[in-house]
Image (cartoon, rainbow, N blue to C red):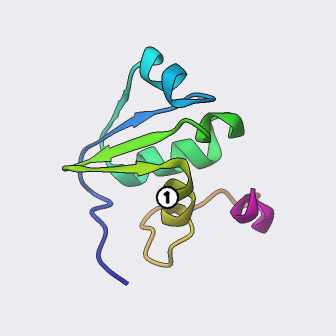
């Protein structure tokens, strides 16, 4: 498992598709981990379809965001009611 820069500054785009996410503009968040947790726990599930997470020089898709959220080394507490079914949506 490679190290992921969970504590790096990130920009999060959310929307039902990439065009909508781009039009709404990025959310500036303090860390990538906070962006990932927001996308998974607080944003509308449909918004992951067009999601993009920019960290350093890399861009991650909604599918990548889900994978990062469920990594063992994810540094933030997950919501207690975050069911296992979220992994497979």
- x and y percent of residue 74 in the render? 45, 68
> Which region is colored magenta?
83-89
- Would you name the residue on which mark 1 appears? 64
77 up-or-down from 13: above or below: below
The residue lying at 42 percent from left, 48 percent from top is 34
- x and y percent of residue 56 in the render? 20, 50
The residue lying at 43 percent from left, 22 percent from top is 22
23 up-or-down from 77: above or below: above
User: Is residue 50 located in the magenta-colored stretch of the structure?
Assistant: no
7 up-or-down from 51: above or below: below
The quadrant the C terminus occupies is bottom right
| Residue density around tag 1, few if under 14, some if 14–19, many if 20 or more, within 10 Å | some
Residue 13 picture quarter: top left
Viewer-closest of 7 and 55: 55
> Does the magenta stretch mainly form a helix, a strand or a loop?
helix
The residue lying at 57 percent from left, 69 percent from top is 70
The outermost residue toward the bottom is: 1
The residue lying at 29 percent from left, 75 percent from top is 3
Judge from the rendering whether residue 14 lies leftward or rightward of residue 45; answer left or right: left
- x and y percent of residue 73 in the render? 43, 76
Judge from the rendering whether residue 27 lies leftward or rightward of residue 18; answer left or right: left
- x and y percent of residue 6 in the render? 33, 60
Q: What is the secondary structure assignment of the residue under circle 1?
A: helix
The quadrant the N terminus occupies is bottom left
């Amino acid at each position: 498992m490679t190290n992921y820069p969970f504590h790096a500054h990130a920009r999060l785009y959310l929307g039902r598709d990439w065009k909508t996410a781009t039009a709404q503009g990025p959310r500036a968040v303090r860390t990538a981990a906070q962006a990932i947790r927001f996308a998974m726990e607080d944003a509308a599930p449909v918004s992951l379809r067009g999601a993009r997470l920019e960290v350093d020089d890399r861009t991650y898709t909604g599918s990548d965001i889900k994978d990062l959220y469920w990594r063992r080394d994810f540094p933030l507490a997950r919501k207690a009611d975050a069911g296992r079914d979220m992994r497979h949506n």
